[in-house]
Amino acid sequence: MIKNLTDVQTGRLSAERRDFLKKSGSLAIMSAFGVSFFTACSDDERPNRVVTPPADSTGINVQGTTITVNLTQATALANTGGWALISAAKVLIVNVGNGKFSALTSVCTHARCDNSWTFTNNVFTCTCHGSRFNTEGAVVNGPALQPLRSFPTEVNDNVLTVDFG
């Protein structure tokens, strides 16, 4: 049996009640999505920021769009897995073994962070938001969707040259 309701009540909420409902709604949304949903890609904060590079600048020169690395002086790059962040050029360099090197832009394709990197198990991690890339620049894990740009490298007489232009 369906009842026909004709008794309708209307009214206005008090200012205190409206304020309470606004705050409760915000709290419910924050609880449902989590605070990180609203702050995860903020450029203002980098809570996981890591100071890099592991290599000092001895033997590393940047001139125009060319980086030269004297491998006898830049000892962090001498062994397989050794890497450096060249901040002046916004370039990551890693020794991939067998006399080969990979050079990638250090500008993350997710949020444009360029100076907060780690390297472990042949994977670069941008510690701004956690994007991970292999030594060729391909995305291993997001949030980045695009690969890092790679640059040509050449080794002659123990000097590595990177053209990042």
Image (tube, rainbow, N blue to C red):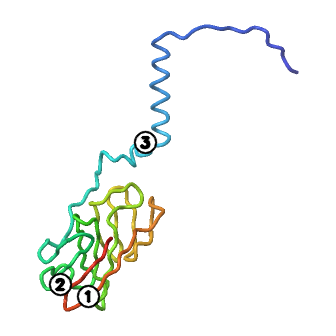
Is 164 located above or below residue 11 in the figure?
Answer: below
Count up the numbered dots. Answer: 3
User: Is residue 97 shown above or below 15?
Assistant: below
CB-based contact (under 8 Å), mark 2 and mark 1: yes
Viewer-side label of 1, 3: 1
Q: Residue furthest right?
A: 1
Of the pair 60 and 82, the residue shown nearer to us? 60
| Distance between mark 2 and mark 1 Cα atoms | 9 Å
Q: Residue at x 26, y 60 (%)?
A: 115
Q: Which mark is residue 38?
A: 3
The mark found on residue 71 in the picture is 2
Q: Position of residue 104 (x, y in %)?
A: 34, 72
Q: Is residue 139 left or right of residue 10?
A: left
Disc assigned to residue 155 = 1
**Amino acid marked by disc 2:** Leu
Q: CA distance from mark 2 to mark 3?
A: 44 Å
SS state under label 2: loop
Label 1, secondary structure: give it. Answer: strand
Q: Position of residue 98 (x, y in %)?
A: 30, 91
Residue 129 place in picture, x, y as percent: 37, 56
